Amino acid sequence: MHHHTRRDFLRNTAVGSSLVCSLAAGWTDLLRAQDTRGATAPPRFDLLVKGGRVVDPSQALSGERDVAIAGGKIARLAANIPETEARQTLQARGKIVTPGLIDIHTHVYDGVAPLGIPADPTCIAKGVTTVVDAGSAGAHTFPGLRKYVINVVDTRVYALLNISVVGQSTLSPDNSHGELLDLRYVNPKLAVRTIEQNRDVILGVKIRLSRHITGENDLAALRLAREAADAVRLPLMVHIGGSYSPLRDILALLKKGDVITHSFRGQPGGILDDQGRVLPEVRAAVAGGVHLDIGHGQGSFSFDTAEKALRQELLPGTISSDVHQFNVNGPVFDLATTLSKFLHLGLTLDQVIERAATNPANTFGFPKGLGTLREGAEADVAVFALAEGDFEFVDALGQKRIGHRKLNPAATVKAGKIYGSASIPVVRIGRASPRRLSHQHFG
Ligand SMILES: [Zn+2]
């Protein structure tokens, strides 16, 4: 009865009914906040992402919540936060709201590695706030990646250092000669020095093990990469597929915390045997703490392999795009499209977001507070429309599937700032009408 009296009191004092709904959880705090906020006091939040379905597997959350941001951090995650408490509101009703996505396999060394793309139009403009450039740069070319990309673009860029000093600068469709054909370009000491000088942004060592990249050198190069990674106590990311040596010999050199990328590629050199069964060595590696990453790429994701692996209950730990110059216009496009392919394959929305936000944040030594919407975390938020219909998805082998749900990026917030092509209205206090943002930070 006492409770009802309070509710009536609040209704009569013209506090919004939405506030009343959330009173059960700590109404006194809210009331105090209202009381102390004078008519001229500024709103306590910088931005409110309002009314969306929040999917945050880091806290096992899937439900309607508002996300309030202040000072570049998540300030409050709750139902029915009044719009009057925020300077601006991003209307997310009917949308999916997730932590800013983390793509752990991209190539954003635009202009130096032939496969590099500009980071921002494909990443931060499409819900991906943090990426790992997976080995575009080696020790000789890393200073440029730092100076001209990491320090400059809006997307938060980390890197894995290629064990070859030249990185991925030698290989293009017109010059298909890889960076490990000559082991004189593999220099663990130089890699270690570069990593020690850039530990704030280099999270591991990358090596690509396909025959056209390594010739007969794959295991020798992998041992040198192992030596460098162990010296700096960071993980290795190993690109598999079409290797000179059998996959089992490669897996034998991996350790807990290492990452296999291109896990669901087609044969040869993939995770399945001739009968389509998951190799026992792959199961053993996963049991030993090796992570399976997708890294869709231009040639490294097969619906057929994925369907067989998932039927045998082998799920990837992380879903990444390997987006680059030769797949950004299809079949990869962006991370959201890769995630949509996994929705088609039968993963739940929570499972795909877990593999593109929660798990990636734990795969490498990122700073704490990425990949989650917990209060106090970095205010990285992605908003998607989950479209329904018939969508044709194409894998790296040209195989097609028709899926019925597609995640379409609608807005991105990084450290509290709205980026990219927000396609949903942003309402600012004091403005008469909603305003559409169009490439706000891309000029
Ligand atoms: Zn790659």
Image: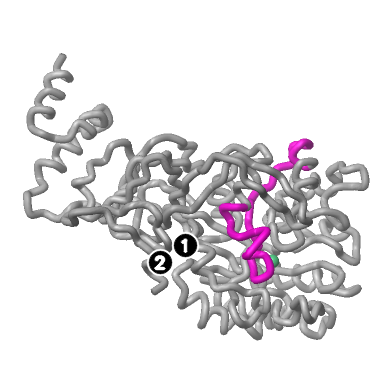
Marker disc for residue 125: 1
**Quadrant location, the N terminus:** top left
Residue 200: where, in percent of width, then height? 51, 71
Residue position marked by numbered label 2 in the rendering: 439
- Determine the CA span between mark 2 and mark 1: 8 Å
- Residue at 9 percent of width and 26 percent of height: 9
- Residue at 68 percent of width and 58 percent of height: 331
Q: Are marks 2 and 1 in contact (CB under 8 Å)?
A: yes
> Is the magenta region chiefly helix, strand or loop?
loop
- Residue at 86 percent of width and 54 percent of height: 267
- Is residue 252 in view from this perspective? yes
The three-letter code of the residue at mark 1 reads Ala
Q: Nearer the viewer, residue 33 or 228?
A: 33
Q: Nearer the viewer, mark 2 or mark 1?
A: 2
Image side of residue 168 versus residue 267, left or right = left
Give the answer, above or below, for where 358 lies relative to 118: above
Q: Splitting the image into four quadrants, where does ligand 1 fall?
A: bottom right
Asked where in the image residue 115 lies, by quadrant, the reply is bottom right
The part of the chain drawn in magenta is 309-337
